[in-house]
Amino acid sequence: MTETVLHAESGRQTGSPAARRLRTDDKIPAVVYGLGIDPVSIAISRRDLRLAVSGEAGMNTILDLTVDGTVYPSLIKDVQRHPVRQNITHVDFIQVNLDAAIVVSVPIRTEGESKAVQSGNGLIELAMTELEVSTTPRNIPSEIVVDVTEMDMDSTIRVEDLSIPAGVEPTVEADRAVVTVMTMATPVLDAEEAAAEAAAAEGEDGDAGDGDAAEGGDSGDE
């Protein structure tokens, strides 16, 4: 994985009013820390950040965060978003040692179709959308692909079954389920259940009608 340059401005003022002014200029308040440095308050261009993480690595892109000529090899540690608009309002960058292992989450994606599951009226479900792994920054995979073609109704794909690049170690249990198969209710059973419910409803209506007639007869005798 190659690094992507992202330029930042230093010396930004802290506090809500200053942050609002930055966002008005289409900039994002941020901070970079890690590897023993004091946290540095910075501002980045929203457009530049969007371009920097637009590659296949996404939020796991290694960034050469450049501040006043100093380069901080960094990863995005955390982002804060507006609760309604969901646009990014703050970013935490963490400086990393490119030769030391770190823990990150990698997206999981399924590919292929299982004829056995389809014919059995099953549904393949992704039980984990991300896998937490330990690896060096340059070795972070952009995604982990799971082939579900050979799955059947009794299949479960676990962490230990995944095809993971060398040097990448999962941090979760090996027997944890990643992809499972759900059994869907069959159309025949659905139709039978609907018919049974309709018959029960008709029976209740009939019972109610008989009761009304009986009450009416008693009233006439009086």
Image: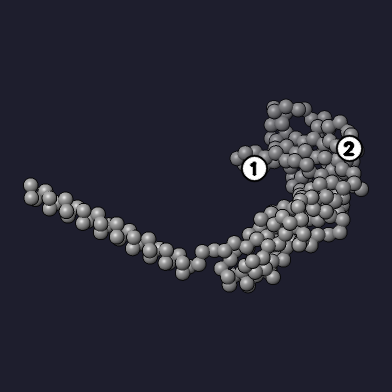
Up/down of 184 relative to 129, above or below: below
Up/down of 203 relative to 37, above or below: below
Residue 173 rendering spot, x and y as whole percentages? 76, 52
Q: In this view, does 165 lie to the left or right of 128?
A: right
What is the crowding at mark 1: few (fewer than 14 residues within 10 Å), some, or many (at least 20)? few
Q: In this view, does 5 lie to the left or right of 190?
A: right
Residue at the location (84% across, 35% down)?
33
Q: Mark number for residue 86?
A: 1
**From mark 1 to mark 2, how far is it between C-alphas?**
30 Å
Which residue is under mark 2?
35
Up/down of 148 relative to 25, above or below: below
Q: Which of 30 and 45 is in front in this view?
A: 30
What is the crowding at mark 2: few (fewer than 14 residues within 10 Å), some, or many (at least 20)? few
Mark 2: amino acid:
Leu
Q: In this view, does 213 lie to the left or right of 165?
A: left
Mark 1: amino acid:
Gln
The answer to which quarter of the image holds residue 150 is bottom right
Q: Is residue 21 left or right of residue 61?
A: left
Residue at the location (16% across, 50% down)?
215
Mark before the other along the chain sequence, 1 or 2: 2
Which part of the image, by quadrant, shows the N terminus?
bottom right
Q: Is residue 157 visible?
A: yes
Residue 9 rendering spot, x and y as whole percentages? 82, 35
Residue 212 rendering spot, x and y as whole percentages? 19, 52
Residue at the location (72% across, 40% down)?
79
* Marks 1,2: beta carbons within 8 A: no
